[in-house]
Each structure stands twice: as C-alpha cells, then as structure tokens.
Amino acid sequence: MRCEQCRNKIRGRAYTSITGRKLCDRCGTRLQGRTAGAVAGGGIAGARSTGGWFARVKKAMRG
Ligand SMILES: [Zn+2]
C-alpha cells in the first residue's frame, strides 16, 4: 500500500482521510491538522476537541 500524498510505502498504520484517501501517518497527521483548522474556522470553533471533531466529520461523511 502506498501513500496517495507522497507515494511512499506505508509502514505500520495507514491513515484514511475524510475523503477516503490512504495516507501514511505523516501525511495524514499533516492533513488532519490542516482540516482541523479549516473546520474550526468554518464555525465549530467552540467545539474544538481534537479527538471528537474528527469522529463526527467521519460519521457525517458516511451518512
Ligand atoms: Zn505520505
């Protein structure tokens, strides 16, 4: 399995982005950080608990 961002072979845990892309841990963490900023800027700045928001977004994306 290869990371869709940097094309490196993924060792250990693969990271799946909210859009379903398979990323290595490094790219995934970076993407998550960027998305978190965008989401917080988009209106849920009050509910900005790092663990919770991602689970909610994932749930929302899958209906
Ligand atoms: Zn990567």
Image: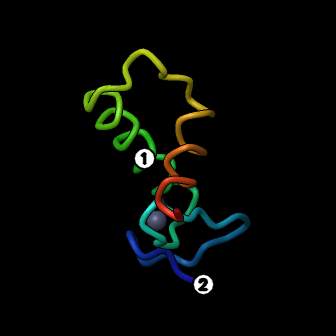
Locate residue 9: give its quadrant. bottom right
Compare residues 8 and 34 and report the one nearer the observer.
Answer: 34
The single residue placed furthest to the front in the displayed view is 63
Q: What label does residue 1 carry, if any?
A: 2
User: Farthest residue in the right direction?
Assistant: 12
Q: Position of residue 63 (x, y in %)?
A: 52, 62
Residue 13 percent location from the top left of the image: 70, 64
Residue found at the very far top of the displayed protein? 46
Lateral position of residue 56 relative to residue 21, left or right: right
Tell whether 55 sits left or right of 4: right
Q: Quadrant of the N terminus?
A: bottom right
Q: CA distance from mark 2 to mark 1?
A: 19 Å
Is disc 2 in contact with disc 1, using a CB cutoff of under 8 Å? Answer: no
- Which residue is identified by label 1? 30
Q: Nearer the viewer, residue 30 or 36?
A: 36
Disc 1 crowd, CA 10 A, few/some/many (<14, 14-19, 20+): few
Residue plotted at (61% across, 73% down): 10
Question: Toward the viewer: 61 or 51?
Answer: 61
